[in-house]
Image (tube, helix red, strand yellow):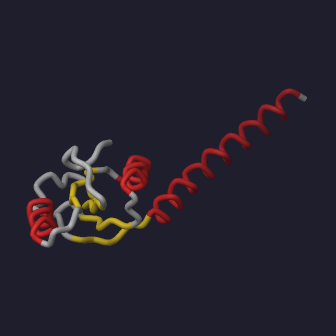
Amino acid sequence: MGKPSGRTASKYAFLLGEHISHSLSPAIHNPAYAALGLDYEFGLMDVPPSRLHDALARMREHGVRRLPVLDDAGHLSGIVAVDNLLEALAEQLDAVVRVLKAEQTRETATRK
């Protein structure tokens, strides 16, 4: 996952959502950043909810801690922070660990 335009900027902002390629946010924000003399770049992060780890990796890559989240209609539905994504991933990992432990217990019981 590279930079939004491939160029290097000092700061990045992204819009997070699914099916957001129609968003005009980059076309609005990037000229404003340039007019203000800011070395920032705005990009889109089209990530389905099932790919939270991709969003987290891209956020970390660019030093981004929070992102706006859009609904299917392109309206703001909330803000997601790195901490939110880490918590969701931890819950998924915990569920996997519980299944593995239950399977180990079952296997041990069948061997006796």
82 lies left or right of 47: right
Residue at point 41%, 65% (across, down): 65
Question: Which of the pair 31/75 is nearer the observer?
Answer: 31
Toward the right, the furthest residue is 112
Q: Residue 33: where, in percent of width, then height?
A: 16, 67
Q: Residue at x 76, y 36 (%)?
A: 104
Labels in figure, total:
0
Q: Residue 52: x percent and y percent?
A: 41, 52
Please name whichever residue, 49 or 81, is drawn nearer the observer in this view of the structure: 81
Q: Position of residue 18 (x, y in %)?
A: 25, 53
Q: Residue at x 23, y 62 (%)?
A: 40
Task: Find the residue positioned furthest to the top.
Answer: 111
Q: Nearer the viewer, residue 54 or 109?
A: 54
User: Front-most of 46 and 61?
Assistant: 61
| Quarter of the C terminus within the rendering | top right
Q: Looking at the rendering, in which quadrant would you find the N terminus?
A: top left
Residue 66, given in percent of the width and then of the height, sits at: 37, 67
What residue lies at 22% left-to-right and 47% top-to-bottom? 7
Answer with left or right where residue 78 lies relative to residue 35. right
Query: Is 21 positioned to the left or the right of 58 in the image?
Result: left
- Is residue 9 placed above or below 71 in the rendered structure? above
Work out whether 8 lies above or below 64. above
In this view, 47 is above or below 23: above
